[in-house]
Amino acid sequence: MSTETVKNPNSEVDAWAAKVAKLRGRKTLERPVVFHDDDTSEAAEQARVVAGHVEAAARKVAQVALDIKNPIDPLVVAAVDEDPNVIEARAGVAAAEKAQADASTSLRVRGLGSDLYEELQGEHPPTDKQAKNGEEYNVKTFAPALVSACCTDPLTVEFAAELLGTILNQGEAAVLFNTCIGVNQGARVSLGKG
């Protein structure tokens, strides 16, 4: 007598339909790009450094007072959390980080989908010199067009060109452009066991 299992063709169809639905339901890749104000960024970092020193000092005092060698013992942690100097330092960090967030500007970029990305890239062919260097597109025209197309805020190509060319420094412009490339070319896959 055979003990062969009979496959239910409906279960395979249902499983495939579920996979297709999951793939169609995936959210498009998005990333924030945050531009910080130098003064508030430095103040926030300084507040974090000071808070770290205050917490370290409070931890040592608590360890000695409680005669506990383990710095992460719950009694030591509780004593540090209740120390007025630590509370004040942490409040200073929170205020500095809020000031930093208030002074920062955030742009959110979203992937276009493979077809639209390739189409946009094709609209900005490389110059002869760029093509000889192996470049796939003219970065001078493609970068502002890509940033404009990917930005979730209404950002014109003209403003994107100004942003990349004169408002942001070279490093910031590169981060914004590369983030736009990343949301379009980033692979969210793994080659796991089948």
Image (cartoon, rainbow, N blue to C red):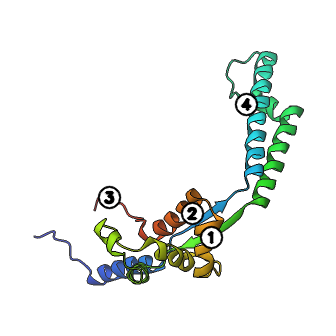
Q: Residues within 10 Å of mark 2 (few under 14, many from 20)?
A: some
Of the 4 image quadrants, the one containing the C terminus is: bottom left
Q: Position of residue 82 (x, y in %)?
A: 85, 34
Along the line of sight, which residue is nearer the eye, 137 or 128? 128
Residue identified by numbered label 3: 192
Where does label 4 land, which residue? 74
User: Is 116 drawn above or below residue 62 in the view shown?
Assistant: below
Q: Residue at x 58, y 68 (%)?
A: 164
Which mark sits nearer the N-terminus, 4 or 3? 4
In the image, is residue 106 above or below residue 99?
A: below
**What's the residue type where badge 4 is placed?**
Pro
- Distance from Cα at disc 3 to Cα at disc 2: 36 Å
Mark 2 → mark 1, Cα distance in angstroms = 8 Å
Helix, strand, or loop for circle 2?
helix
Mark 3 or mark 1: name the one nearer the start of the chain: 1
Residue 192 appears left or right of 78? left
Mark 4 crowd level (few <14, some 14–19, many ≥20, 10 Å Cα): few
Asked if labels 2 and 4 touch by Cβ distance under 8 angstroms, the answer is no
| Spatial CA span between label 4 and label 3 | 40 Å
Q: Earlier in the sequence, mark 4 or mark 2?
A: 4
Residue for badge 2 = 173
Number of numbered labels in the structure image: 4
Cβ atoms at labels 1 and 4 below 8 Å apart: no
Q: Is disc 1 placed on a helix, strand or loop? A: helix
Tell me which numbered mark, 1 or 4, is placed earlier along the sequence.
4
Q: Residue furthest left?
A: 1
Q: Comparing marks 3 and 2, which lies closer to the viewer? A: 2
Give coordinates of residue 74: x percent, y percent.
73, 30
Residue under the point 54% across and 60% down:
175
